[in-house]
Amino acid sequence: MKNIAWLGLGLIGLPMASRLAAAGWRVSGFDVNPERLKLASQRRITAAASAAAALDGAEFVFTSMPNEKVFVEVLSSLPTRATVIDTSTVGPQASAKVAAALKGVAYLRAPISGSVGHAESGQLTTFVSGPRAAFDAATEAFKAYTRAQFWVGEGEEARYAKLAVNLMVAVTAGMLKEALALGTKGGISWEKMLELIGESVVASPVVKYKQDPVRRHDYTPTATTSLVLKDVDLMVAAAKAERIDLPLATVMQQLFRRAAEQGLAERDFFSVVEGENPAR
């Protein structure tokens, strides 16, 4: 197995890195948060004292950054010639900026679709773009934490794929909010509405996954409202750059921004189905 450096051991980065370590890869990880490093060391990951230490001897460098600013700062100055594989959710413009900075380095854009639970169980999906040969070389690593791997092109295609899929997820939360409001106003109980939605033609995997937590009013975050708002902001910015109209993305941007302002920023993003007072 190859040596892997993993930079960014956050909510979803840690279980992904852990899956690689459990599969036998030698993983050296770094995060600016000491608590995340402590957790990593309990999951077969060597906790590195610095990013540079994690990179030493790595053949693949995986990164999972919290936002575009950190993404550009960290990846633009990586002192490595190893294949760089970024799993963050960022826009195509920021990613292209990093690609220019990494000139001469194989750079794979490999954002993922799924939740923390999917990461823990290895059931994520990844959309990958960049050099095809680099994708082929990294496929076995991708298989450690994903159930499906799609190579979609040589450039920034994976960034667009990720934003497109996340737009549908965000809109699903908004649809469920309005469906529950209409159904419960009509006299149907919260639990019954969720039950019938879960057995109807609109019961997508994300609806089924969120059905039980929403029924219990449990908004322990798998992805926070602030994180999804960041993603929707990226969608709107990408649409503006490409001069296309995404009215639903704009509506969801307003919904999630309002929810964050109402105190739901660090709750799971599906808390928007209830507004600022989730407990009923």
Image (cartoon, rainbow, N blue to C red):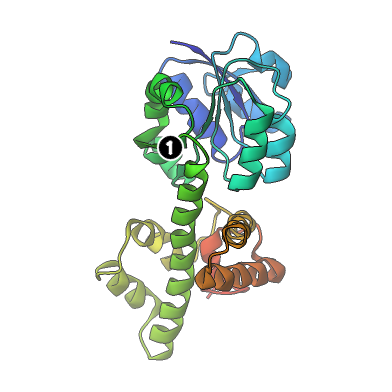
User: Residue 201 location, x and y as percent?
Assistant: 25, 69
Q: Residues within 10 Å of mark 1 (few under 14, many from 20)?
A: some
Q: Amino acid at mark 1?
A: Gly
Q: Nearer the viewer, residue 268 or 82?
A: 82
Which residue is depicted at the point 50% across and 33% down? 15
Q: Report whether 168 appears left or right of 44.
A: left
183 w.r.t. 86: above or below: below
Q: Image quadrant of residue 268?
A: bottom right
Q: Report whether 19 appears left or right of 65.
A: left
User: Residue 7 location, x and y as percent?
Assistant: 63, 27
Which residue reaches farthest front? 243
Q: Can I make out residue 90 in this image? A: no
Which residue is depicted at the point 61% across and 40% down? 95
Which residue is depicted at the point 55% across and 52% down? 223
185 w.r.t. 195: above or below: below
Can you say which quadrant of the picture contains the N terminus?
top left
Q: Image quadrant of residue 136?
A: top left
User: Residue 221 location, x and y as percent?
Assistant: 55, 53
Q: Nearer the viewer, residue 197 or 258?
A: 258
- Which SS class for mark 1? strand
Return the residue at label 1: 153
